[in-house]
Amino acid sequence: MAELTGKSSIGFQSSAQSESTIFGVNPATGEKLQPGYAAVSEIELNRAVELSGEAFKVFGKSSGRERAALLRKIADNIESVGDELAVLTPQETGLPEPRIRMETGRTCAQLRLFASVAEEGSWVGARIDHADQDRAPIPKPDTRSMKKPLGPVAVFCASNFPLAFSVAGGDTASALAAGCPVIVKAHHSHPGTAELVGQAVLSAVKECSFPEGTFSLLYGPGRETGQSLLRHPLIKAAGFTGSREGGQVLMKIAAERADPIPFYAEMSSINPVFILSGAMAERGEALAAGLHGSMTMGVGQFCTNPGLTIVDNNSNLEPFISKLTDLVCSSPSATMLNSGIGSAYDSGANSFNKNKAVETLARGEAGEGDCQAEVLLFRTTSDSFSNDDSLGAELFGPSTLIVTHDDKDKMLALARSLEGQLTATVHGTDADLVANGDLLEVLETKAGRVLINGFPTGVEVCHSMVHGGPFPATSDGRSTSVGSNAIERFSRDVCYQSFPDSLLPRELQEDNPLKIRRMIDGVII
């Protein structure tokens, strides 16, 4: 295994701090893992950001082909340490080796997807409107616009995806693809994994001859290091995946800066699943099995975990409930990512248990230790759900709340009452779906991704994917953190009026030297 140093990377230099304050902990055993990581000093944090600002002067002007080469090299380097990650990351997170290998592959796929987008180049949205000197009463000037990179970007690693939403995850990949240097704030739950991946990124930066400051990796407490990073005036945008509480604190900081910046946070979602009556009658037990697999996947620590299931309270319900109850009761306990997440899950479950409007239908096998989670199944009515906002809170773990309703009007009222979500799912027969088009219309306004006859866990890495949604699913429902459109988060439009052709960016020059897709005088060519 590559040697881990326990140091932040300040550009190409290692932090000089020596007092270890951050240790990975094996959630299955409670073992403190080595090495310990020293929190970066304020001076070093400022140095990292200053280096990123200097790097932007070069990196921001690099070609899409050059950035594509960097992204592909990062992917190659991560793959070269895949066996090491498969050993180290399960120790830090409790996640099984197959999950880590899958996530490594997904991370590399994301990097290569954004490499293809950067290389092809049409993402800049080039628009050209030619001059018309004969237009009356006022001549029309020549105007051309395209997207340009914002500048240095801060990325906050996620606890639940140590690779795909962390050091070289989607936020980093899309920011680098856009031409933005990246400073990553490592997550305390998997510091060694962060360093190993960070080494892969830094090696790629050097091999591709990009300047120091193109990438830095910082360790430190979120309330200090993370907030200081976000406040730095050279930081021009940030990406975050985490809790609603933490995200809102950072949203406020980003908005209250002297120069407010875009802050893209993925925070809270209960991902409602609506099962319509025809589907329930036709395949209730199969739906129970599918729901159980989805709610327990990754110990329920997916941001797309189906935490809410809405069903018609009729005679077809019982086989579904019976099957799901049996599956939950036979479910073993499993290890959560860290004691903080385990404690939050227990606290949320206790709140449901104490709520007189909520029935605990089934419990899985109990485990021992702060990080052991039991699978839970709850039930309430649509009336109770509508009258108690606490029932719509995210319970981050392997559970779902079954909500029964007596008629379509109550189902629609419940749908309209929901907060913003990452996903919303509908199971139905063809007849169900035709009869419930109004439900689908409501859900389009509530979620970034609407599914029919599937389950929300698992996010395909592809151009069309949307992983976002209205608040509080994200801080900005107009954006996505997965899919090639994520690159647009870290760019802004610049218009060039009456420029000589030789002074225009190549994307906007008349003869289109990059051969990208452009809109010319209102026509996409």
Image (spheres, rainbow, N blue to C red):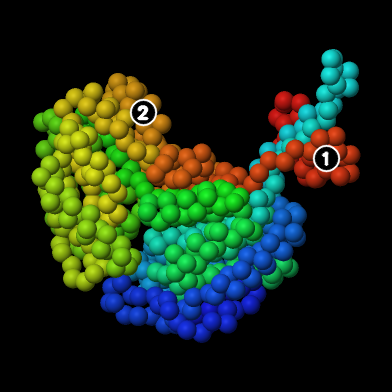
Which amino acid lies under the numbered mark 2 shown in the image of this protein? Val
Mark 1 secondary-structure assignment:
loop
Q: Position of residue 501 (x, y in %)?
A: 88, 40
> Does residue 253 lie above or below 37 as drawn?
above
Query: Which residue corresponds to mark 1?
Result: 509
Tell me if label 1 and label 2 are in contact, CB under 8 Å: no
Relative side of 43 to 107, left or right: right
Query: Which residue corresponds to mark 2?
Result: 442
Q: In which quadrant of the rendered image does the C terminus lie?
A: top right
Relative side of 88 to 80, left or right: left
Q: Is residue 111 in sight in this rendering?
A: no
Mark 2 secondary-structure assignment:
helix
Name the residue rendered at 33%, 65% in the picture.
337
Residue 454: which quarter of the image? top left
In front: 124, or 345? 345
Q: Position of residue 384 (x, y in %)?
A: 17, 36
Name the residue rendered at 61%, 53% in the picture.
236
